[in-house]
Structures are given as C-alpha cells and as structure tokens.
Image (spheres, rainbow, N blue to C red):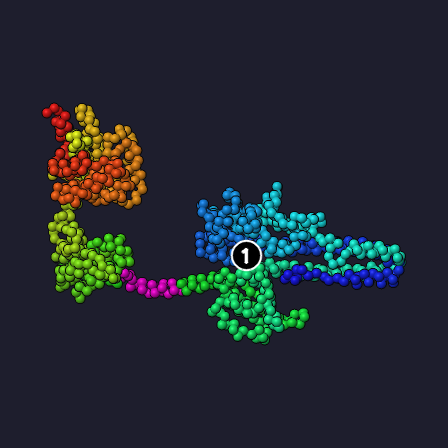
Amino acid sequence: MATLKKGGIPRDRRSTIRLFAVLTVLFFGSLAAATVFGSLFIHDAIRQERQQQAEARAEGFAKALKTILQMTDNVGRALISTFDDGNPDIYRTSVSTYLASAPWTKAVILRDDGASIVVPQAMSDAMLALPVPSEDADGRKIFGPYTLQNGERVLVYRYASANGNLELVVGFEAILEAIGLLELEATTQLSVQTAIAPDPTEIASVGDDMPLENAARQNINIANARWTVSVSPRALSEGPFDWILAFRLAVGLLLLVFVAPLAALLMLLRARLRDNINIRRSMMEVENLSLHLDVALNASNIGLWEHDMETGEQIWDDQILRIYGIEGQSNIQSFESWRAWLHPEDRTRFRRFSWEAIKKNNGFRSEYRIIDADGQEKTIRSAGNAYRSADGRRKIVGVNWDVSADKVLQEALSEAKVRAEAQNVALEDARARMEQIALQDTLTGIPNRRHFEKRLEAAQTGDALPEGMRIVLIDLDGFKTINDTMGHFFGDDVLRYAADIFTKNLGPNDFLARTGGDEFVALMPADSDAESFAAAVEAAFSKPVHIAGRMCRLGVSLGIATAQDSRDSASDLLIKADLALYEAKNRGRGRTVNYTSNLMDKTFSHKRLVDEIQEAVEAGEITAHYQPIFDVETSTIAGVEALARWQHPRRGLQEPKIFLGVAEQLGLLHEIDDTVFRRALSTMERCAADGMPLSGISVNISAQRLRDPQLLDQLSALGLPAGVVNFELLESIPFDSPDSELIKTVNAIRKLGIGIDLDDFGSGYASLVGLTRVRPDRLKIAGQLVAPIIDSEESLLIVETIARIARSFGIEVICEGVTSQAHAEKLKALGCVLQQGYYFSRPMDEDQLIAFLRARSSPA
C-alpha cells in the first residue's frame, strides 16, 4: 500500500525538450508565439487539475476520517446502551472486542456515582488523571485535547446516560496515522473545533505550516466538534515537471523562431494534456482506494503479507508486526522466522508445509495460534492466493487477522449453549418428576406434608381415626444451632441421617413424613409399637453421632397422641400430639411425652393466663414495687429500682416471672414498661413532697418499648431533670447484634438526661460486646454471679474481673442479689460499694417505701 501511495507518473523531461526543439525547427518562428499562449493555457489547466486533485484528496481523507469517527460514535452509543441494559459481562466483552479492533482508541472510562472503571486497567492512572470537566453532557460531547506523559495527544468522547457517563479516549495522532495524514503534513492540514456555532474554538490541529491559499476543504461534524481537512494544491514549481523552466525555454525560443502552425501545436499539446489528466485521475482513484483499504485494514486489525516462492523471502506490513508484538522491526521476514512464532502445539502441522501445494490448490486458508513478543497467546486466521507479479516472479499474497477476541466470544457462546441445553434437559426431567416431587420431600426422599395429609385423610373413617391409631410428632433438638454453626449443607446431611434412623425403626405398616424444617411425623396403626420406636430413636440420638465425616450432638423430642375413641378426628389428634411435643421440650428436650388430659388442662391454664394479663393491663392491675440500692460505704440509699408487679384480684401479688414472658409474646411489654415508669415518677414526686427526695430511680425498659416510635417524643415532653432517672436495659435485648436503630434510640435517651444501666450483666444476652456498644452509665452484675462468691473463688474472680472491666470504661457497678452480710463485705472488699438485695430490703409498694425512708431519716 505504501508503494501505491508514493507512486507518481514518470515523466521524461528530455523527451519533452526534444519535442519542443523539433517543433521549433519544423514550425519556425511561429512556435514562439504558440508557446507563449500554450504555456499560459497549460499553466491554467495544470493549476485547475491540481486543484481538482487536491479536492479529490481532501474528499478521500474526509471519507476515511468520517468512517473512523462514525465507527467510534456508533460503538460509543452501543457501549452506553449495553451498560444501561445492566449486563456487565456483555459490556466487558464489547469493550474488549472494540479496543482490539480500534487501535486509535486508547481506553474506555465508565463513570458511575463517583466510581470510575477504566479498560484496559493498566491505563487507569493515566486516564483518570486527565482534566476532563465533570459536568454532565447532553447526549454526546467531545473534550480535549489532553497530552499524555508520552507526549501523545488525546480527545475524550463522552456519552451521557441516566446511569452514568461513558468516555472514549481517542488518540489524535493515531487517527491521523490511520487515515494517512501524518505522511502528508506538508500539503495537508487537519483541525478540530468545538462549539460549532456561534463561537467555534479550535482545540487541536496538525499541519499548521501549510499554505491555505486555494486549499480544498472538507468538514465533518460529530457531536459538538467540527473536523476540517484542508489540502493545498501542489505548487507549479514542484513535481516531476518544472513549468517555470519550460516557460523560460519558450521565451528563449521566441527569440529564435516566429512562425509555426499554431493549430497543430495546440492540438498536440492538448491531446498530451488530456492523457496526463486521465492518467492522474486514475492514479487518484487508485490512491483513494488504497487509502480506504488502509483504513479498513487498520480498523479490522488485518495485516498483509507476501511470500516470494523463488527466494523464500516474506514481506510483512506494519499491522502484522503489531499483531506479533514486534512493531518497528524489519518488514522482511522468512517462513522459518514465522514458524518460530507458532504455538508449540501448532508447529507440527506446518513441518511439511508446501507452498507449491498452495499454488496447485489455488489458495491457502488456515487458523493457528502464536505466542507474541509479550508472551501472550493469540489466535490468527490467515488466507492467501498465488499470483505472478509484473516481473514474472511467482508469489503468494495473503492477509492475517487477529481473531482472539472472536475466539473467546465463540467459546463463551458455545459454553452458554451447552448450559442452555443442559438446563432444558433438567427442565424436562423436573417436569417428568413433578408429580413425584409433589408427594415427596426432595431432601430426605421420604413423603412430605402433602403426602401425609392425604394418607391421614384416607385413614379416617367418617370424621374419626380408628381407635388405637397413633400420631408421633418428632422434632430435632439443637438443629438450628447446628445449622448456624456448621452450615446449611451439613444441616441437610443431618436431616437425611435423621430420616434414615426414623425409617429403619419403623414398623412395616408405619408411615413417616417430613412436614417442614426439622419436624417429622409418623402415622402408626394400633398394632404398631410406638413406645419401642420412640425408645430406639432416643437411644440413637443419646450420644454424639458421626455424619458426613463430622461429629455432632443433637437430640430428639417426641410427642405421641393415641386415638381413644371414635370422637378423635385427625385434626384433634394432631393438636394432642403437638401438645405432647411441646411438653417434651419444656421438660428439657431429648425425651418422649404421651398426651394426657393434664396437658390439655395446662394448655387451658396458659390460655387463661393470656386472657387475664390482657385484662390486667387494660384494668390497671399492673403496679410498681421498689427496692433500694445502697451505698455500703456511706450507708446511704443511692437510689431505688422500680419493679413490675401484678396485683391479681384472686391470686394476689404476682411476680414478673409469672406474667412477663406471656406479656412479651402478646406484645404488651411496652405498655407494662410505660405503666411502671409513670408510677415511678409519681412515687418520686410524692417522696419529694414528703421531704424525702430520692437521689435517683431506675426503671426497666424492654426492646418493645425501645422500638416505640413515640418514645422519644413522650420522654422529651416530660422535661425530666438530668441524672435522676435511669433506664435499665433488660438482658433480653440482643445488643450483641448490630441493631443500629436500638443503639441510636439509647443514645437519644441519654441525651435527654436519662442514665442508661445494663441490667443482669453476665446472664442472657448481656455480654462484653453489648457493653462496648451500649457504653452504659452503670452496670448491674447479675445475682446468679454474685450468689456463689461466698464458697467459690472462681465466682469471686469473675465478679472482680467484671468490676475491673467496667471501671476501665468509667462505668459504675451495682451488685444485685446480695442476700447476706458476707456477700456485702466481700463485694465491698472488691470495691463494689453499690449493692442491692434481700439483705438490705425486699421490694416494697409505694406506702411501704415512704415508711421505710421516713424510718431511716428519723433520729435513732
């Protein structure tokens, strides 16, 4: 292609001079006048011809430039559309394919919500350092130029969308090289302007020294930029023919001759000029075609090669050298040097390669792999044909193109097709097994709940089950812990193992199903031995079991209900079995319980308690009792704790352990907390009115109360003095989990001047993690830890350690459950001076508290 570019029309200046000499001799003196007028005519014709040539070259460059710019613009639109579709895999593949086929594009930048992704990643620092304006563009916009560290100038195409901006970084010189302008800078100029109207601004140009007089121009508008290609006609003094010298000769000849047949001279010269113009026109068309071919080959990453069959010499163009990673090396290569680049696994195919065979077969097509200079594996597709050159030499010319990206995409599509076919097969299998799965537990292979319900319905006679038929509900103890600590896959193995144990111990007529989670149910006729089944199952799980190569410990709880008469329906028997299972778990799990009428009575009692506690909250039967907190160092009362009590109209005063659990299940804790809190405030006001103000009062608060959205507004409206009221966070609040809302609420309460106590530390959820997250003002060590310190040095050490940890955080310590003087003295020796317990005082109602305070304040 370079030969075609540099080629011109050879002219023999001496033959032209001889022609003029002969004509001068033949036509005498008239040749001088004819030469003058002919030279002027030719001068104008040549100027017009070179002007046309410049316009044709400008049009050719403009077409090539427009091809590249439109390709870049179309790819930019396609990439931003692919990104907006939300498929990152297709987006990355599209970007890699485009970069491989467009050498003028240096990088692709994706900016999304402050994050930037650059492809290729190796150019991230250089690309992100470009001072591209951050404002959003409407659709498309071009910025630049910017100069990279290697001196190369680049332009940035930005494509905006709702999800972010896509920017194509395009090399300015690379575009010029692709369309062939760098080789013609002396007669060609390219400029880029932005803001086409009304105030265009030139942002980049090349060939600024070119004279622009009579230059042919072509404009291309892309986005906010106008690209202008200017080609200046060649001067008359340039080129193979020196018209100025010819004019001087004509003037000299004019002095010698005067007469010549003017008509013959003009006809001859005009015919010669017409031939030259036609030849030049043909050469321009060839040059334009060559330029388009160069652009197409560069854009498609295709390189040309030629093999001389007589010398064995090969010529590789620059594109092939770039493919092989040896850009800048010699274009002259050999077949042996080409074979050295081949992948070791592909070399054997070309050991007996014959160029003569290619000639006979009238063509060459192959695909092979190479290892380029950077060690990267590439897949090359090659094709060629034999021909005979103008000098009669036998040659083969062909093309190479890098299809590595296509190969990867093809393999990905093939894998996707295989996966799709496999999914279709799996779908057909799933459909075929649909009926079986509908009645079978897919994890354990035993019947599922639906199958059990059908079996149970079929076992009924009328609306009752046969007398003696049993339903056995089975629940795995500790299965959730295993699932959480050892993983769900191991949990599945445990369920399969349990189903296998249950199945092995069933009688021939028994029916087993998994009804969900870790729950199983067995349906046994009257002649089956349910007790033996239960005993065998308990024994199997009474010791650690090995499952899937791992050891674990879990138990089973069983609830058995037997149909006594024709009045027991299937639903009745299921309820009874469920009550028996619930009782088995309440008794400590790992056991079997048969249903009795007492269980139903117990259920009724629980139901009655549920109804009564709801009525108690509504009727105002919830009250508060108070237990003082003593400072044993000063023998003063440091505050009191308000405790919830239920004044039952028939059973008398009820402690929290009887009703708080049920209240929590019913969602009534926040109402009970609010009732106790308001009674405590009322008691505090009464004490102050009686001249015995309390230094502080503590009230328990539950997680339900903390999650009340109106809590903070209610507390703020009370206008409580700072440092008087403390909220004790119940040990049932899981502060170990990162519940940011609870922590925010606690901090907001503290800002209102209400102190925060962490209650029952060392039991339940209260832990060191909760301590660091809540950062309470006071910490109350649980009575379970305090009680054994008299006889246990370890317990004493635990209490001492907790106290030291609290003090290191600047937290006061209150010890609960102090029942003797020995407890009080040991705790005082540890520095725990704030104590609370039966040793000092039992909880009192409001009147008793007033009397207690009055007795302490009166002189002995």
The structure residue drawn at horizontal position 60% and vertical position 69%, both measured from the top left corner, is 313
- Residue 836: x %, y % from top left: 16, 35
Most common SS among magenta residues? helix
Residue beneath disc 1: 102
Mark 1 nearby-residue class (10 Å; few <14, some 14–19, many ≥20) = many
Q: Which residues are magenta?
A: 421-444
The answer to whether 768 appears left or right of 607 in the picture is: right
Secondary structure beneath dot 1 equals loop
Check the image and report above or below for 155 versus 778: below
Specify whether residue 686 is in view: no
Residue sitting farthest toward the left: 860
- Residue 314: x %, y % from top left: 59, 68
Q: Nearer the viewer, residue 343 or 471?
A: 343
- Residue 540: x %, y % from top left: 17, 61
The structure residue drawn at horizontal position 56% and vertical position 52%, both measured from the top left corner, is 171
Mark 1 is on which residue type?
Ala
